[in-house]
Every structure is written in structure tokens, then in C-alpha cells.
Amino acid sequence: MIPIANPDIGDDEREAVDEVLESGYIASGDVVTDFEAEFADFCGADRGVATANGTAALHAACEALDVRGEAVITTPFSFVATGNSIRLAGGEPVFADIDPETYTLDPDAVESILREREDVAAIMPVHLYGLPADMERFVELGAKYDVAIIEDAAQAHGASVDGTRVGSLGDVACFSFYPTKNMTTGEGGMVTTDDPEIETAIRQFINHGRDGSAQYAHTTVGHNLRLTNIAAALGRVQLERLPKFTEARRENARLLDEGLVDTAVETPTVPEGTRHVYHQYTVRTEDRDALQSALEEGGVDSKIYYPTCIHELAAYEGYSAAVPNATRAAAEVLSLPVHPNVSSDDVDRIVEAVADAGVQHV
């Protein structure tokens, strides 16, 4: 079976982790600090704060922006952490529809909400599947309506818009280093920002509310959401390898684009000026069940990201949203293997399995 994900951990990662283990300094420390600086520099941001996971990064960003009691506009077509992070910080997620071709948050739908509500504190676009959202429009909307922009970049390490990488386009950005992501620390996350006040607030929130003046100076209520030196050591090596990982993903996506051109599935759309890093290679068809069955028979793993919009989950009882594009996408999308360990022979098998499915156009 060709797996949908396959984390690539090599000898260099093992040596880096062993070095930390041998040092005895395994909790948060200098290795984390180095990783923060290197990742921020990679994104083109001034500051980075490492967190225990991607959800912690999003939660901390919402806390730093003080969204409590206010609304944050975001997409319903994402992993639940996008909405949960807003709620955990005391905010109200307000769901706007997506662009039907890119699956990312639709700026026009967002502006419609901004015109109607005066309690919006932020917009949280998601760079879904590794494709940047329309950040030019969102930055414009942020300035026009005086709201912050939080990039949910959990799936988009190294993606860019007109040569500028995500993580440096909004007021604050959040990444995940879960094992299936484009690079991993096992579990982990990162917040990037140019704003020193946001950085300070995040550091305080993830470290028990300490203000840094003394070990036991706790001036606010916080969590313990720090990253460890062990995880950071793994992340530093993965960051060095990320450009090669990305090129492999993009090459596999190019081969899939070519191979699937005569099939009846809709392949990913990449707007001009954006650089997709293909955390997922996502196609769509009205015959998704038939396609997934054919792939399984052909020895190809596939996954649905995401089968249910966030506001329709049981945990979101009482929430509602008029989001027909997101609802349709949830019923039709299917992600195929595209990770760096997918070979050209694997791509041929994937294409063959899709062609054999005989599915219909959307």
C-alpha cells in the first residue's frame, strides 16, 4: 500500500536528538531558542516562538491578540483546531465560505461579514493543503476594517505568495510539526511574528504566565505549552531538509497533474504568484466513494480532508453558517499520496488506479 503520509527521519535527526539526550538538557532551552530563530528566518519573520503543538500555537496567538468576547472570521473547511483555538481563547469563530477552486477562505465572503459585524477582532485564513490563501486581499481587509490577520499555516511550511513566504504575511502565523506535516518534530508548533508585543504575550502564555522577571513571577494565567530541546533538535534538522522535501512534493504533484489530465477528477488549482507546497494533493469528484474504493484495490492509500465542516461537528452544536462551497467540497474531495517518499513508479500506480475508477466529472 502506498501510504498517504510517511515521515522521513534519518541518521542526522537521530544524532541531533542523541546529542540533546546526552547533554541532559532535554526540556526547553538553547536548542529551542536556536530553532525559533532559524524557523523565523526561514519564513522571513523577525520572531519565532516554539510551542508544544500546532493547536497551542493557534491558541496562543488568539490569546495574544485578546480575542475574548469578540469574533474571529475563519473557514469551516479545515481541521477542528482552527475553530477550537478561537473558542479556547474565549472568542467566537464565525465561518465564511471558501473559494470553490482553491478551497481557501473567500475574501468576498469575509468582507460581507465584516460589513455586518462590528465585533470582529481578527481574520484567520488557512493555507489549506499547502496552498496560500489570498493574503493580498486579507491584508487589505485587515487594514480597511482594523482587524488582525492570523495565518493558520499548519500545512504550508515554505509556501509563498509572490516570493514572500507564509509566516510573514499577516500579523501572526502558526505552524504545526505533527508527523504528517511537511516537516516534523514529532509533536510541536511555531508562532512567527514581527510584533514584539505579540511575541512577549505568547511567551508568557505558554510558560505559566511568567513575565520573565523572575522564575516565580507569574503575572497572568498561562499554560505549559513549551517545546522541548529533544523536539527542537529534530526540527532543526528537518528544517534543513525541508527545501528538498518540498521539491520532491512539488515534483510528485507535477507528475500527478500530468498523469491525471485525461481522467475525470478535478486536480488542484494554483493561482498565479502562489507557490503550493502540497502538504496534500487533493482532487475532487462526485463519485468519491468509488474512487476511494478503486484506489484501495490498487494499493493506494487516500484520505478525506475534511469530511465534515467544523460548524457541523457535534462539538459545535448551535453554530450555523451558509457555506455551500465548503459543504460541497467536504462531500467531494479526496487526497492522494504526494509525500517525498512517493516514487515515480508510485505515481504511475496512483494514476492507473484513478483511471481505472471511471469516476465522473464534478
Image (spheres, rainbow, N blue to C red):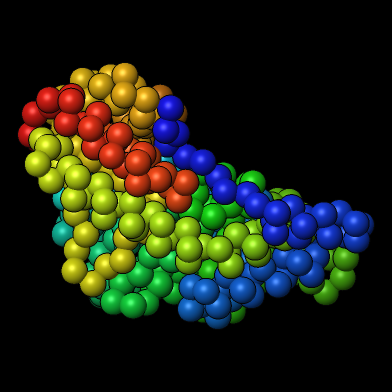
Give the residue at x 79% y 70%. Answer: 30
Horizontal and vertical percent for residue 113?
22, 55
Horizontal and vertical percent for residue 80?
43, 39
Horizontal and vertical percent for residue 237?
65, 63
- Where's the N terminus, which quadrant? top left
Q: Is residue 312 above or below residue 257?
A: above
- Where's the C terminus, which quadrant? top left
Q: Is residue 224 above or below residue 353?
A: below
**Would residue 62 be seen by someone viewing this image from the given angle?**
no
Looking at the image, how many numbered discs can be counted on the residues?
A: 0
Is residue 349 rendered to the left or right of residue 177? left
Q: Nearer the viewer, residue 224 or 188?
A: 188
Quarter holding residue 34: bottom right
Q: Is residue 351 above or below residue 74?
A: above
Is residue 217 rendered to the left or right of residue 269? right
Q: Is residue 158 above or below residue 164?
A: above
Is residue 107 rendered to the left or right of residue 349? left
Quarter holding residue 76: top left
Residue furthest to the front in view is 345
**Would residue 158 be seen by someone viewing this image from the given angle?**
yes
Q: Nearer the viewer, residue 72 or 340?
A: 340
Give the residue at x 70% y 59%. Answer: 12
Q: Nearer the viewer, residue 2 or 212?
A: 2
Give the residue at x 37% y 77%. Answer: 164
Is residue 148 rendered to the left or right of residue 199? left
Give the residue at x 33% y 51%. Answer: 252
Horizontal and vertical percent for residue 180?
51, 43
